[in-house]
Amino acid sequence: MIKFIICEDNDHVRKFNEKIISKITMPYDFNYVLCSFDKYNKDLKTLIHTPSDIKIYILDLELPNKSGIDIAREIRKVDWDSVIIILTSHDELEMKLLKEKLLILDFISKFENYEKRLSDTINMVIEKLNVKRIISFKSNKELHHLKVDNILYVLRDNSTEKTKIVTNDNEYFVRDSLLNIVKKLDSRFYQTHRACYVNLDKIKTVDFKNNTIYFINDKSTDYLSRNYKKGLREEL
């Protein structure tokens, strides 16, 4: 369980942060709780002092009764494992705040690529936690939620003009472009053909002479073109 804890006195920014977190967590397979506060209070204090699996704090630097740094100090008195992100309107304070030695993961300006920076930082944390990513799509008018771990390869199927997603025990045909599907995957997927990406973790062996990739469950694909052979050798 991951707890996202926001402390922000600006209603608009706080709700915007909540939307960012909801959007980021959609492609992942994990349970989370979102706790929002407009200032430091008794409930936030209790949350800080209550052990939890994983906490990610997003703290505004300037708050009405206790600054984000003051809250960070209180967190570090009892917890050196949680992630702390500070939101600030004063970039010039970053070096000064670093000297506090509170292991702040990031200082994010509210006026410079705010949404992207916060999204990138939270995504990085989730990836480091090795949370399982999922992909959602419609196939045969049914909505599917599939763990990326289970995918062997994806390819553009010219006979159906759909993208084919192949897993250990099933195949799905999706009316979406290969590029859009690949964008939802991760760095394990390597392009072996202009119309195919394979999961490197699922490859058992490769017959480079006959252009055939064999996967751990004995499924295979011959979508291996000359232009990608050298790169695949290096990846393996």
Image (spheres, rainbow, N blue to C red):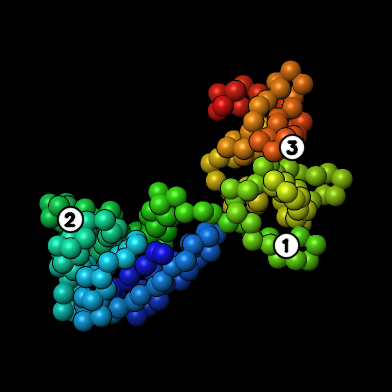
Q: Are marks 3 and 2 in contact (CB under 8 Å)?
A: no
Classify residue 150 as left or right of residue 219: left
Residue 208 seen from this side: yes
Q: Quadrant of residue 38?
A: bottom left
- Which residue matches tag 3? 219
Circles 3 and 1: CB atoms closer than 8 Å: no
Q: Earlier in the sequence, mark 3 or mark 2?
A: 2
Does residue 67 appear to the left or right of 18 in the view shown?
left
Comes first in the chain, label 1 or label 2: 2
Task: Report the residue marked by disc 2.
Answer: 102
Give the amino acid type for the residue marked by disc 3 in the picture: Lys
Q: Residue furthest front?
A: 217
* Residue at the image position 33 percent from the left and 70 percent from the top: 5
Give percent across and percent down for residue 9: 27, 78
**Which structural element holds mark 3?**
loop
Disc 3 from disc 2: Cα separation: 50 Å
Residue type for callout 2: Leu
Q: State the residue position of label 1.
A: 138
The structure residue drawn at horizontal position 43% and vertical position 67%, both measured from the top left corner, is 32
